[in-house]
Image: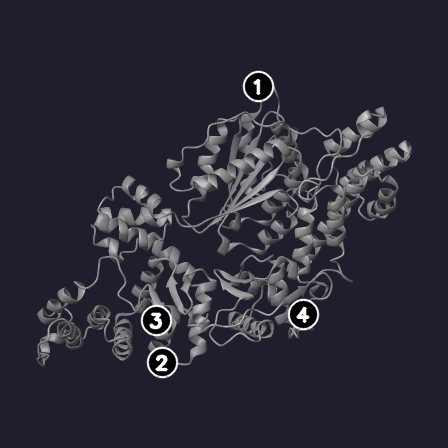
């Protein structure tokens, strides 16, 4: 968390490497990254790919799920130390520009070219003939991508740490994909000798990679070695059956048939690799045609989510044409994830899509993979008349029923049965499979997701996974890493715009312009928050819009606060007394203690998504409701004393802010100071001599007549729904 910054010079040129030993270089000079756990912070942020990594995730990963009591404080120290070595010329209190704080955690902000792993992935994505000037240029790009790899494995020094192993495996998988993409280009350029030379050891090292075997088989066939080509494919078939108990893909089976028939389709140049890093079909692979045209959803039914609906529809169209895709749909509680899913399901139904939904239960004790059980059960009605369901589905295995030799349900055979069932259904039309609340998912649910993604690669299936970003588990992170090669789209729902919130509130009976404005500000565009506040207004009247907190939302927000360190919660309570938005220097003056604990507390709030930084040196509560929960959670005695401290700082620094002074004086339950605030305003506006005021004993009561009489002039200075805190 940074206070008000002066101007500074630009950031140093920093390069970071993780494809081998973790290292950093600034202006050509190696940087000392410090102790192993501090180095791990930087490496973990690199693994985040420039995206935000939450504080909870960093703490869990750095301490392997068993953090000490002061883990968050230690993390802040590591971040501070890394900022010093990565940006040594950054002035005090100026915002970091490399390792930045972004709710709900931290992110690394460097150009893609400055991080070897990012540079490798970017080159892999762009190394296609369509994206370059042809296969020769694409081949050069891939050669450069593979040259990014140094000696050793990715994140090798953190071997054994689950996060490092997952990311290392993902990058190693992408490297194998790059090798295959490169030889695919060689084959397109009719250079089969080089393909056999480079790919034969790769196929031996990765006997389960069908794409590699298919490329090698085509190259051997073009060299006149038809028998060797068939042997390669038969070897893959046998390995898949022996190790995994599955049959090869439709693409491999089709290629095998083409080889036996010496199909002319094998003679022309092999089509170039797909745009995504995921291997695409070779000659002979069947690809579903485009879906029939459909009418788009009515944007008025989704309250401002038109762009998100369009992205979901585009993902569905791609899945129908090219095979399975995944959409990761994130958003805080109440953001409207389920509503959006229902809307896209209705729109896709017009195009022949069928939808099945499963929900991950938030409680323990549910059967394994419960969400997928719901999905598969819902799809049974999609079977064409006269067809019988897969024998493995009659009945769905019950954890209380027969068990396998290990004492648990037979997950492996269950996954195979579900895959066969869904694959069969997708042959009759595209499927939309929805798994809700995956942040609650058990390991079995995520394993099924990974299995289906691998087995249904060529099927017209779109899987939509909804989750809350600040509650994802290690298992979810691992599943996403394992699915990195699957075509995917990520959508994060923010707050609705003012027009959409207004339309939503009017539908729920709120029409007064002042109340509409207040509810818009307090809800920050969260649809659930807005609807709950509308219900509160209907039940208790318009005044409830100002500071009322519906009970359900209060519990939800309090749970988010409980995840912060105690010191950070104290700082946020002080900020809540100051107002919805506060100047950091002003808050430091109110606190009166050392600077570092206050800045650390604010930074924890920003990292948790409870605060935002609208400008350097300022913080604002992401939701006014969050500020209200903190404020009303303070005991009255503590709250009044804090208001008195705010008032004292206002008098020292901002005597002209009479409205704020009067409000804080009244909240401090000090009628004499409130009188002073009102008289100060009178003196400013009228050139008359101020008369001394005398407080009577009755004024000591907040409900006394003098005190009540003071509330009117002070509040008259403040528009309804606006903060009177220092701005």
Residue corresponding to mark 1 = 385
Labelled pair 1, 2 in contact (Cβ < 8 Å): no
Res 342 → quadrant? top left
Q: Which numbered tag is attached to residue 574? A: 3
Res 63 → quadrant? bottom right
Closer to the N terminus: mark 4 or mark 1? 4
Labelled pair 4, 1 in contact (Cβ < 8 Å): no
**Real-space Cα separation, disc 1 to disc 3, in angstroms:** 66 Å
In front: label 4 or label 1: 4
Q: Position of residue 292 (x, y in %)?
A: 55, 25
Of residues 531 and 100, which is closer to you in this image?
100
Q: Position of residue 707 (x, y in %)?
A: 13, 70
Q: Are there few (<14), some (14-19), or many (20+) residues within 10 Å of tag 3?
A: many
Residue corresponding to mark 2 = 592
In front: label 1 or label 2: 2
**Real-space Cα separation, disc 3 to disc 2, in angstroms:** 11 Å
Can residue 403 be seen? no
Q: Position of residue 565 (x, y in %)?
A: 45, 69
Mark 4 residue element: strand
Closer to the N terminus: mark 3 or mark 2? 3
Q: Position of residue 144 (x, y in %)?
A: 74, 54
In front: label 4 or label 2: 4
């Amino acid at each position: 968390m940074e206070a008000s910054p002066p101007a500074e010079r630009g950031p140093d040129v920093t390069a970071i490497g993780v494809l081998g030993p973790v290292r950093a270089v600034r202006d050509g000079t190696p940087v000392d990254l410090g102790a192993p756990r501090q180095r791990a912070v930087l490496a973990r942020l690199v693994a985040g790919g420039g995206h935000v990594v939450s504080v909870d995730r960093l703490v869990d990963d750095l301490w392997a799920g068993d953090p000490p009591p002061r883990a968050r404080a230690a993390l802040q120290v590591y971040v501070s130390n890394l900022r010093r070595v990565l940006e040594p010329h950054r002035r005090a209190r100026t915002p970091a520009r490399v390792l930045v704080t972004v709710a709900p955690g931290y992110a690394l902000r460097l150009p893609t070219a400055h991080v070897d792993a990012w540079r490798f992935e970017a080159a892999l994505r762009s190394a296609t003939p369509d994206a370059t000037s042809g296969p020769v240029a694409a081949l050069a790009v891939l050669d450069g991508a593979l040259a990014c790899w140094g000696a050793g494995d990715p994140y090798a020094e953190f071997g054994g740490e689950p996060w490092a192993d997952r990311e290392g495996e993902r990058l190693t998988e992408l490297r194998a994909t790059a090798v295959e993409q490169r030889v695919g280009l060689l084959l397109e350029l009719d250079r089969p000798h080089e393909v056999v030379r480079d790919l034969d050891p790769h196929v031996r090292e990765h006997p389960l990679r069908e794409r590699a075997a298919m490329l090698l088989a085509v190259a051997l066939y073009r060299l006149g070695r038809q028998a060797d080509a068939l042997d390669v494919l038969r070897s893959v078939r046998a390995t898949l059956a022996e190790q995994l108990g599955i049959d090869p893909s439709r693409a491999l089976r089709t290629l095998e048939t083409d080889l036996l028939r010496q199909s002319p389709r094998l003679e022309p140049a092999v089509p170039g690799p797909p745009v995504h890093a995921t291997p695409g079909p070779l000659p002979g692979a069947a690809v579903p045609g485009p879906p029939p045209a459909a009418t788009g959803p009515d944007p008025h039914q989704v309250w401002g989510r038109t762009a998100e609906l369009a992205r979901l529809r585009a993902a569905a169209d791609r899945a129908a044409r090219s095979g399975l895709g995944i959409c990761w749909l994130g958003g805080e509680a109440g953001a409207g994830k389920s509503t959006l899913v229902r809307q896209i399901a209705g729109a896709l139904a017009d195009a022949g899509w069928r939808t099945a939904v499963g929900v991950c239960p938030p409680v323990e004790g549910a059967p394994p993979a419960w969400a997928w059980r719901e999905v598969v059960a819902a799809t049974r009605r999609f079977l064409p008349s006269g067809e019988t369901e897969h024998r493995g589905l009659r009945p769905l295995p019950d954890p209380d029923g027969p068990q396998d030799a290990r004492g648990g349900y037979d997950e492996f055979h269950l996954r195979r049965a579900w895959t066969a069932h869904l694959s069969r259904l997708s042959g009759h039309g595209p499927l939309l499979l929805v798994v809700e609340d995956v942040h609650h998912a058990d390991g079995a649910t995520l394993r099924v997701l990974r299995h289906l993604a691998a087995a249904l690669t060529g099927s017209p299936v779109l899987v939509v996974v909804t989750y809350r970003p600040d509650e994802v588990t290690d298992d979810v992170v691992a599943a996403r890493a394992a699915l990195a090669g699957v075509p995917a789209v990520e959508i994060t729902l923010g707050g609705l715009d003012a027009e959409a919130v207004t339309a939503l509130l009017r539908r729920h009976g709120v029409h007064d312009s002042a109340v509409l404005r207040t509810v818009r500000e307090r809800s920050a565009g969260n649809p659930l928050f807005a609807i709950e506040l509308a219900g509160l207004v209907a039940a208790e009247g318009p005044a409830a819009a100002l500071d009322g907190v519906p009970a359900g939302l209060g519990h939800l927000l309090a749970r988010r606060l409980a995840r912060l360190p105690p010191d950070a919660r104290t700082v946020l309570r002080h900020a809540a007394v100051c107002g919805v938005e506060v100047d950091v220097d002003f808050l430091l003056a109110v606190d009166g203690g050392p600077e570092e604990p206050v800045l650390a507390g604010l930074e924890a709030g920003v990292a948790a998504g409870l605060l935002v930084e609208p400008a350097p040196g300022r913080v604002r509560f992401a939701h006014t409701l969050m500020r209200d929960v903190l404020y009303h959670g303070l005991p009255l005695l503590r709250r009044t004393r804090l208001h008195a401290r705010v008032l004292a700082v206002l008098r020292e620094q901002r005597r002209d802010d009479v409205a704020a002074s009067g409000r804080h004086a009244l909240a401090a339950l000090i009628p004499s100071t409130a009188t002073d605030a009102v008289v100060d305003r009178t003196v400013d506006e009228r050139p008359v001599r101020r008369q001394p005021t005398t407080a009577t004993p009755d004024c000591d009561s907040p409900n006394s007549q003098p005190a009540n009489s003071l509330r009117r002039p002070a509040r008259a200075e403040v528009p309804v729904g606006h903060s009177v805190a220092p701005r």
